Amino acid sequence: MNSPFHFALIGCGNIATEHATQITRVGKLAAVVDIDLAKAKKMGDHYGVPFFENTSAMYATIHPIDIVVIATPNGLHAEQAIEAMKAGCHVLVEKPIALLTTDIDKMKAVAERTGKQIFSVMQNRFNPPVKLIHSLLQKQVLGKIEHVQVNCFWHRPVSYYTNSWHGTMALDGGTLFTQFSHFIDLLCWFFGPVKIAKGSFKNTRHKDLIEFEDEGKIQLEFESGVKACMDYSVNEPNANKEGSLTIFSSKGIVKAGGAYLNTFEFEIDDLALAANLKDQIDIISKVQYTPNDYGNYKGSMRNHCHVYNSLQNTLMNQAPYYTTVDEAKNTISLINLIYQAR
């Protein structure tokens, strides 16, 4: 495939601006689509590209399209990805890649049949504190992992759910899909398959707005024997307060903390390891951290530039993409296992 790549963007909501920014950096935006024609027109006019109300009209009109970026409600991801691959396009699918593992299997089957690739978005893997912890686990320098604690205390205002697909079972799927699938992905990436999942869920502040929980508590036991707890909520009154992952081990404690896994803390008994981690903190502290900002609420870290760099490297140089479809499937499988433990 020759550069620049020609992209189409389906979905002109909050995250679309970040995708458009990255698309125009690595390639060419050829068209935008949204069922809200006013949103499509606004983005199309801004970037000087054709805009459409439906995908079939776009595929019939715009050529070439190399990659379709899907930034629509969760429940639409699978069918839109399949349609795009059948139209001859690779797909980059915002998280979650789908709501059901059976839908992911259908996507994989179409990808194999058409020779097209599926790329998912799990940009928190690029957070420097997260990358550091993954490296420590890969090197097995933390000793025995005794416990893992994940805390996600975020804010989602009433306006986020009002007259929106957010909060619906069919298009949203649940808080673990839309807000906290990044954290589930990291648990799978760090510790592998889960053999036991337990969960308790409540809707305490959004009873008339959403069809599922706004807070929950999860207990996991991985096949490796590692045990983890996750407490999460979207009920913080004004802003995201914490998004952290803490590992308690025989060597001490390491934590990716802050509101967006954007800080690194440690208490380690091993003097050599502690000295190395102090050097890493000095490096991490120099990184400029900004979350995706949607005005009245904020999302995860703005790492989509790394996602697009990896996609470009894969398509141009056949380098491995930073995450696989099967890894994305593992995340969705675990979320569904957790919800089945109600």
Image: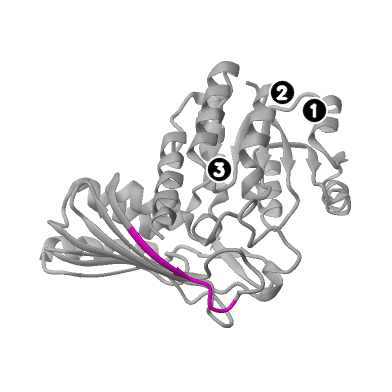
Mark 2 in CB contact with mark 1 (< 8 angstroms) = yes
In 3D space, how far apart are the residues under numbered discs 1 and 3 (Cα atoms)? 22 Å
Query: What is the span of residues highlighted in magenta in the rendered image?
Result: 198-205
The local secondary structure at tag 2 comes to loop
Report whether 313 appears left or right of 267: right
Instruction: Give the residue pinned by disc 3.
Output: 98
| Vertical comparison of 63 with 276: above or below | above
Which of the two marks, 2 or 3, is nearer to us in this view? 3
Is 201 covered by the magenta stretch? Answer: yes
Identify which residue, 296 or 64, lies in the foreground. Answer: 296
Whichever of labels 2 and 1 marks the residue nearer the N terminus, that label is 1
Report whether 235 appears left or right of 47: left
Q: How is the image coloured?
A: one colour
Query: Where does residue 14 sit, x and y in percent of width and height?
Result: 70, 58
Q: Is residue 227 visible?
A: yes
Q: Residue at x 82, y 32 (%)?
A: 58
Instruction: Give the residue pinned by disc 1.
Output: 59
